[in-house]
Image (spheres, grey):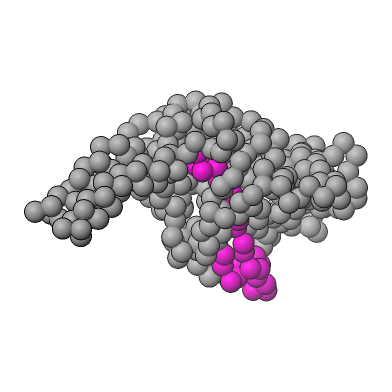
């Protein structure tokens, strides 16, 4: 009789105190925005540039026209090829912004905007500022972006549910989207999910400092063809680091293939925050790299999201930690009752 009571007590206790899960996080609401930056120093060295390859047929119309005009110039001999990527060399700051609006119980719209400054389209052809922007429809039931014709694009990468992270083998970019837009290559899938990345280090971004633990997600593909005529290809790596409290993306490491960037035509970019890279070099030289690190990819620059307060021990007060702690407490009656039952 006593043994049969043990499991129900634990289940009732855990169920009564566990936080209610939801497809969208608490901060996901009308008007929310997140802005990420890859900053350049005031006086960059010649090698301090970022490369943003673009797939012409996926570019927003206005951006396509500006790039094509700059690329071809007035010469009739140079033509932009829609069957291969065009590499944009960026010598200024780069910003990636996500804006949420038209939120309902089933879906929301997300405006993705990439701003590039001092952009070289080819030798001698420079644009002072280039903006690539598109509105994506996010289904809040399956957390998947869809095109207007219903083609799935992939899951959002600017936030994640830390209590239900993706598993190995899940698609980062949907095969249907890749096939439709002639992105020939291997499936781009999740290959690593970890809570131990930089587990003992403070992570500095332009917006604020973050404390461990972090959620690290990695996706890869063996090849992605970037020239349909020659068949030349590149391996893709996507590495993303999330805040475990809110599920918000803190920084990218590599971001070769993400649904948001691919939707505006950006494939296999290499955004590196040169300002933070210099700071990291000094940190390493000063022997502090064992306890702090600087985000070097697209890292959080601005947002109107309110982050939860941290505890007096400087450890994030996360929902997941709360759940595990409560679960442990709730298991104590089970342990005690089991011990008593075994004692007779």
Which residue is at a point 57% across and 64% down the rendered structure image?
A: 220
Asked if residue 74 shows in the view, the reply is: no
Report the quarter where the C terminus lies.
bottom left
In the rendered image, residue 185, in percent from the top left (x then y), is placed at 55, 69
Report the quarter where the N terminus lies.
bottom left
- Please identify the quarter of the rendering in which residue 116 is found: top right
In the rendered image, residue 150, in percent from the top left (x then y), is placed at 38, 50
Whether residue 146 appears in magenta in the rendering, the answer is: no
- Please identify the quarter of the rendering in which residue 106 is found: top left
- Please identify the quarter of the rendering in which residue 225 is found: bottom right
Q: Which residue in the rendered view is the most extreme toward the left?
A: 1
Which residue is at a point 60% across and 70% down the rendered structure image?
A: 223
Q: Is residue 122 left or right of residue 60?
A: right
Asked if residue 107 shows in the view, the reply is: yes
Magenta stretch? 220-249
Residue 239 drawn above or below residue 22: below
Whether residue 248 appears in magenta in the rendering, the answer is: yes
Q: Is residue 100 left or right of residue 149?
A: right
In the rendered image, residue 12, in percent from the top left (x then y), is placed at 21, 42
Viewer-proximal residue among 30 and 62: 30
Q: Main secondary structure of the magenta part?
A: strand
Q: Is residue 64 left or right of residue 124?
A: left
- Total numbered badges shown on the rendered structure: 0
Which residue is at a point 90% across and 50% down the rendered structure image?
A: 46
Residue 303 drawn above or below residue 286: above
Viewer-proximal residue among 254 and 131: 254
Residue 167 drawn above or below residue 88: below
In the rendered image, residue 113, in percent from the top left (x then y), is placed at 61, 38
Viewer-proximal residue among 134 and 49: 49
Which residue is at a point 56% across and 47% down the rendered structure image?
A: 213
Q: Is residue 189 left or right of residue 291?
A: left
Viewer-proximal residue among 190 and 234: 190
């Amino acid at each position: 009789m006593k043994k049969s009571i043990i499991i129900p007590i634990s289940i009732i206790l855990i169920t009564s105190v566990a936080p209610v899960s939801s497809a969208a996080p608490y901060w996901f609401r009308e008007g929310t925005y997140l802005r990420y930056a890859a900053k350049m120093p005031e006086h960059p060295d010649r090698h301090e540039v970022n490369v943003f390859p673009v797939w012409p047929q996926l570019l927003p119309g206005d951006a396509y026209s500006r790039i094509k005009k700059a690329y071809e110039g007035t010469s009739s001999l140079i033509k932009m090829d829609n069957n291969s990527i065009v590499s944009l060399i960026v010598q200024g700051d780069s910003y990636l912004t996500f804006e949420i609006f038209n939120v309902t119980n089933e879906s929301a719209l997300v405006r993705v905007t990439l701003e590039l400054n001092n952009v070289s389209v080819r030798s001698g052809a420079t644009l002072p500022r280039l903006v690539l922007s598109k509105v994506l429809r996010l289904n809040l039931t399956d957390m998947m972006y869809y095109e207007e014709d219903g083609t799935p694009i992939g899951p959002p990468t600017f936030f994640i549910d830390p209590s239900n992270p993706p598993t190995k083998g899940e698609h980062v970019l949907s095969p249907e989207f890749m096939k439709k837009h002639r992105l020939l290559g291997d499936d781009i899938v999740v290959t690593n999910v970890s809570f131990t990345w930089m587990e003992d280090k403070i992570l500095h971004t332009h917006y604020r400092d973050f404390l461990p633990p972090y959620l690290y997600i990695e996706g890869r593909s063996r090849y992605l063809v970037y020239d349909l005529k020659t068949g030349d290809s590149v391996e893709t790596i996507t590495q993303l680091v999330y805040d475990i409290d809110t599920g918000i993306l803190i920084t990218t490491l590599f971001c070769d293939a993400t649904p948001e960037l691919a939707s505006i035509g950006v494939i296999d970019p290499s955004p590196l925050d040169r300002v933070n890279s210099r700071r990291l070099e000094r940190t390493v030289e000063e022997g502090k790299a064992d306890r702090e690190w600087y985000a070097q990819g697209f890292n959080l620059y601005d947002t109107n999201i309110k982050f939860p307060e941290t505890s007096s021990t400087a450890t994030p007060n996360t929902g997941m930690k709360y759940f595990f702690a409560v679960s442990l407490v709730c298991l104590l009656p089970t342990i005690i009752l089991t011990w008593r039952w075994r004692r007779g």
